[in-house]
Amino acid sequence: METHADRRKYARIQLCAYGVDTVCVIMNGQERCHLDLVDISSGGARLKMKEALPDFPGKRLVLSVHGIKDGGRLQNLPAQIRWRSGQEIGVQFDTKLDMALTDLQRLVG
């Protein structure tokens, strides 16, 4: 049986192994919410809610990873909510991140 991991287009960096307490902010207009970054790939991220998630129109948002020295590479990323399960959501970036997996791991690790 094929799993979610088998269907993934991009390799993911699991933060439980590489980093802790990495916080993201997602915004849509004046609405904003803080979430924990669970994992990230060049195509999207999995986030865990720290507070109630606002109802983002069209499930569109802008995501920024806080507390890392990334030269702006993980800031203001347009994305769309693709799924929600309990306290977690999955987002897909509008544009694939232009960086190698090792560079992404170094930024969030």
Image (cartoon, rainbow, N blue to C red):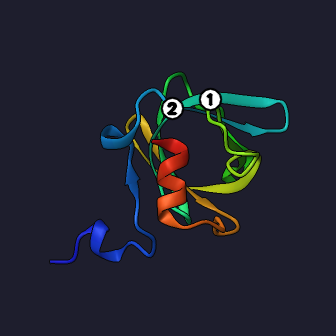
Q: Which amino acid type is marked by label 2? A: Thr
Give the image location of residue 87, x and y in percent.
Answer: 41, 34
Q: CA distance from mark 2 to mark 1?
A: 7 Å
Give the image location of residue 35, x and y in percent: 54, 31
Q: Could you tell me if the residues under marks 2 and 1 are in contact, i.e. CB atoms within 8 Å?
A: yes
Label located before the other in sequence (2 or 1): 2
* Residue farthest along the left direction in this orientation: 1
Asked if residue 10 is positioned above or below residue 88 in the image, the reply reads: below
Q: Which residue is mark 2?
A: 22
Q: Mark 1 highlights which residue?
A: 67
Graded by Cα atoms within 10 Å as few (under 14), some (14 to 19) or many (20 or more), the crowding at tag 1 reads few
- Quadrant in which residue 99 is drawn: bottom right
Inspect the image, locate mark 1, and give the three-letter code of the amino acid beneath it.
Answer: Gly
* 105 relative position to 69: left or right: left
Q: Position of residue 49 (x, y in %)?
A: 49, 30
Residue at 70% across, 65% down: 94
Dot 2: what SS?
A: loop
Q: Residue at x 54, y 67 (%)?
A: 100
- Between 102 and 52, the residue placed more toward the observer is 102
